[in-house]
Amino acid sequence: MTSGFFDGIDKITYGGSESDAALSFRHYNPDELILGKRMEDHLRFAVAWWHSFAWEGQDPFGGQTFERPWHPQDDMGRAKLKVDVAFEMFALLGQPYFCWHDADIRPEQGNFRDNLATLEEITDYIGTKMEQSGTRCLWGTANMFSHRRWMAGASTNPDPDVFAFAAATVKSCIDATHKLGGENYVLWGGREGYETLLNTDMGQELDHMGRFLNMVVEYKHKIGFKGTILVEPKPQEPSKHQYDFDAATCIGFLRKYGLEDEVKLNLEQGHAILAGHSFEHEIAVATAEGMLGSIDMNRNDYQSGWDTDQFPNNVPEVALAYYHILKAGGFLTGGTNFDAKLRRQSLDAEDLLAAHVGAMDVCARGLKAAAAMLEDGGLEDALRERYAGWDTPEARAMLESDLDSIAARVLADDINPKPRSGRQEILENMVNRFV
Ligand code: XUL
Ligand code: CO
């Protein structure tokens, strides 16, 4: 017996690039081998519980547009119906993973004791669905930004009782993630930042956040959770300024608090754009430091200046993202989470499926293009060639040397560099052969 929500819609399959069916994969073919590995195992797609099932279509000017059978979301019976529908959708799409916040899966109870009890109950229910279906948990996280108790931050709140509530909440969410065999645990600090410096002691807040994250890592080891702890950079929204501004800021923070070997990054396309970066920039910053964990795949509107969380549909952009991921060896525990929501006029069950089908196809095309670029090797050759000067013993010795000796060599050898073309257009043309 199904919930009936997706009635009339059959399992979505690969129909090939010529397929004109509305709900059919044209590029995502899970078993197809890309660089010797199944496409599904490269991409490791996950559905984001919050946008797909908990979000009701509100925007700053208007309320709910979606009317789902599990609304209002204040009741455990309807929370279970939401789980049923979610697993029906995972099966229709062949989605291997899902991600969740506590607040997406159980109704807010207003106190920790009842939040804990309902979280345990709903994750037990999810666990039985996982056993039946084989769908897995990519990551869990705590929503410490929606309820009013978090309005001045969670671990960075000036009130120690909020810090305590946050610690208890994160403990319960790591426990639940561990119970569900989650492969990562994410912390995104939407309220870990400030609205005005006039009421904010930034140094103290950062120290509290650093200590909090160390407690998370200590607890992970204590209970034997093998997943990766991830932080998710974002520059602003909802806070005016968020401490986890971008990948580079997070890496500096992790090093300062001794967490660089324990915590990696969950990078989101839209957050990169809000920080004034490209997505591949953020990925390259993380891979240069060995700190890429997972990605939240979406697309941000380039005009709006806020977080639009649209489903991805730009193949050249996605291809460059996967190019850098593949170059770094691909995902380990991470994957591709669709942290993306429908537009609020897209009311139907079919819209929800079409959004995921399109996004999975865009990512599959991007992955194929990225693999083809790597196999072609032209970009890598050009890069090696550009830095080839550093392969000489004199050049390498310079890095062990000092300014004095280098200056003496410049004088003695009359070194006078000859500028060379960066060949940007040639390289861009090369990329365009594959996308
Ligand atoms: C918010 C965002 C979150 C995190 C998880 O912009 O991306 O959904 O991914 O809390
Ligand atoms: Co995200």
Image: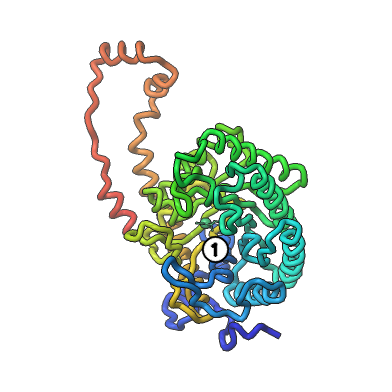
- Where residue 382 appears, as percent x and y from the top left, is 34, 43
| Identity of the residue drawn at 67% across and 83% down | 2
- In this rendered view, identify the residue nearer to me: 223 or 294: 223
Tell me if I can see residue 433 in this picture. no
Q: Is residue 340 left or right of residue 418?
A: right
Tell me if I can see residue 270 in this picture. yes
Cβ of mark 1 under 8 A from ligand 2: no
Q: How was this image coloured?
A: rainbow
- Where residue 423 appears, as percent x and y from the top left, is 26, 44
- Where residue 214 appears, as percent x and y from the top left, is 65, 38
| Identity of the residue drawn at 45% across and 39% down | 198
| Identity of the residue drawn at 71% across and 58% down | 111
Q: Residues within 10 Å of mark 1 (few under 14, many from 20)?
A: some
In the rendered view, would you say 314 is above or below 225? below
Q: Please, what secondary structure does the residue beneath circle 1 have?
A: helix
- In this rendered view, identify the residue nearer to me: 394 or 341: 341
Q: Classify residue 369 by image quadrant.
A: bottom left
- Where residue 120 appears, as percent x and y from the top left, is 76, 62
Instruction: Return the residue at label 1.
Output: 39
